[in-house]
Image: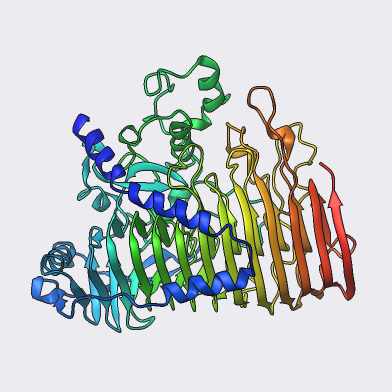
Amino acid sequence: MASLQRRSLVKAASVAPLASAFGAAAFANRIPGDPWIQAQAIIDRLSRPLSFRRQDFDVTAFGARTCSLVKVQAFISHDDQGLIDTQAPDSFDCYEAFAKSMAACSKAGGGRVVIPSGNWFCAGPIVLLSNVHLHLMAGARIYFSNQPADYARYGDFDCGTNGKLMRTRWQGNDCLNFASMIYAFCQDNIALTGEDWTSVLDGQGGVPFEDGGPCWWTWKGRNKTVNPVSQSKTPGYRAGEPSGATFNPDNPESLAALAPDLSEAERALIQGHDERWRTDEQFLPALSEAGVTISQRVFGLGHYLRPSMIHLIGCTNVLLEGYQVTNTPFWQHHPVHCRNIVIRNVHANSLGPNNDGFDPEACDQVLIEQCTFDTGDDCIAIKAGKDLDTQYGPSQNIVIQHCTMQSGHGAVTLGSEMAGGIQNVYAQHLRLQNIHWETNPLNTAIRIKTNMNRGGWLRNFHLRHISIPNGVQTSPSFYASLPGSPIHSRTVATAAGAIITFDCDYSPLNDNVRTRPPQVSQVHVSNVTVGNVTKEGKTASCHQAVVMLGPVASDYNGSAPVPSVMPVSDVTITDCDFGAPANAAQPFYLYNVAGLTLRNVSVGGKVYNATLAAPA
């Protein structure tokens, strides 16, 4: 593994120049002023088009051939199955032809790689390269293989029985894992585009590995949401089956060998009091907390961490435009430590577990516009690392505008992985249409989630002109608190039911290490209009208008002295109409909040002009 570690470090070093650029941008954005002037400067900067050499490389010239289709019984969401198209048996694998066309285009100095109309099967990742524009014509649909082994064949790092893996980041932590279907590492001036939404990238996340068996989505494991309206099941999951949330005997019994410098107390804190830390989804964060290098964080075959569909790391000057992505194994788009990235007119349309639409992590200068999100998790979730993996710094200077949201957990979400900090986020002119409100409603509109493990800070978050004609989920979904918490379990609806949700005690039972109090401040919301819907004879817009759960100090489990646990502060809500909450008796819930200022805010027909606060 010596060569693996050396190559990993070389690649990590190649990203370093971006870090200094991020720091300069952060300093520049401390200058006070009208936040929307700052937002417009980001829009103007990112509206300049990328430039590519004018030569097309048709993938058919490199041997690519279309495939025929057959029907297969598959999951199409958490809860539903149907007959959908998949590639016929023995279909031609276009992986090599796609790779050759990308390489030829790159060698020529760049240009456009074109995938014509038709159905194409690809059993491996498409790796984007600098100065190359990958374009799907109208009617082009790529069916990516649904077999995990196909994403452990072509990676940069030979990890033996775990496969040939890629450097990735999974829920805020770095690791070597399965390749994503679309992948890029440290590339500049790249584009992925489609002619229209008939240009489709299909991850086949709900198609069984074998007839009647599990699929990518099964690897989520047991669903733990309390009182869900939809998404109550994990597709194909049966108790005890392998998943990211199931005990994996391949993970070691102790961190002692991997992290010999840990004290016994540190090791005990990270591992916790049971073997839950040996599930893959807990083992990776444990490796981060223990300071284990990425060369030793090896997953892939024998493990159950699903890859993001489109995963870009350390890239600059990126355009994503004009296509549809569907049936993704995990998050739909996950750029990490990227600068100058635009996603425009993309249909993020995937309803499986953890199918977030667009999750920029530790990115700087991002424009998200004219996209439509219909997702199995958060529509947009801005992130910034987890545990000790904060080397890429904050997410910052992000504009979201003119987008439409349908189903999802949160429409605009910050967190939960935000250890590196989030600042300067601007969202405007959004339509949270929520057309599936009867069966698969949008859980909450504006969502902030962190906890004593994630830590980090959030500041300068501005939202305006948000339309929510069909409200959000009108029944509560509660969270489970830790033993001894002043917040009783299943009493606070942070999981779903509010228009605005601040959840600073997000899923605390999932984290053994809780030593980093988060700081949330400077959040300003204006001109939000929410409509009512009638379900089972009851008319409402939400369960509660605002749920604001600040950090819970009793969660801290580190050494003395206990650090300061700051309340949520400097939050304003102005000129809003939140419709009629179902919980008319308690439209607001606040805990550990120093100041929530309401100006001309209508809730259930009553207008509020007041400053609210609540102690811890």
Please give left or right for residue 91 compared with residue 171 in the image: left
Q: Outermost residue toward the top?
A: 264
Residue 295 located left or right of residue 249: left
* Above or below, 538 relative to 315: below
Q: Position of residue 24 (x, y in %)?
A: 46, 54
Q: Position of residue 451 (x, y in %)?
A: 64, 43
> As displayed, is residue 171 above or below residue 310?
above
At horizontal 44% and vertical 73% (from top left) the residue drawn is 45
Q: Quadrant of the N terminus?
A: top left
- Let me know if residue 215 appears in the view: no
Can residue 95 be seen by looking at this rendering? yes
Quarter of the rendering occupied by the C terminus: top right
Nearer-the-camera pick, 357 or 365: 365
Where residue 4 sits in the image (x, y, percent)?
Answer: 22, 36
Q: Position of residue 535 (x, y in %)?
A: 75, 74
Left or right, residue 468 beside residue 421: right
Vertical side of 283 occupied by 378: above or below: below
Q: Residue at x 54, y 44 (%)?
A: 419
- Total numbered labels: 0
Tell me: residue 551, above or below residue 41: above
Quarter of the image for residue 612 reads bottom right
Viewed as shown, does residue 413 lie left or right of 337? Answer: right
In depth, the one of 469 and 78 nearer the eye is 469
Q: Is 464 in front, or is 484?
A: 464
Q: Which color scheme did the rendering employ for the protein? A: rainbow
The picture quadrant where one finds residue 115 is: bottom left
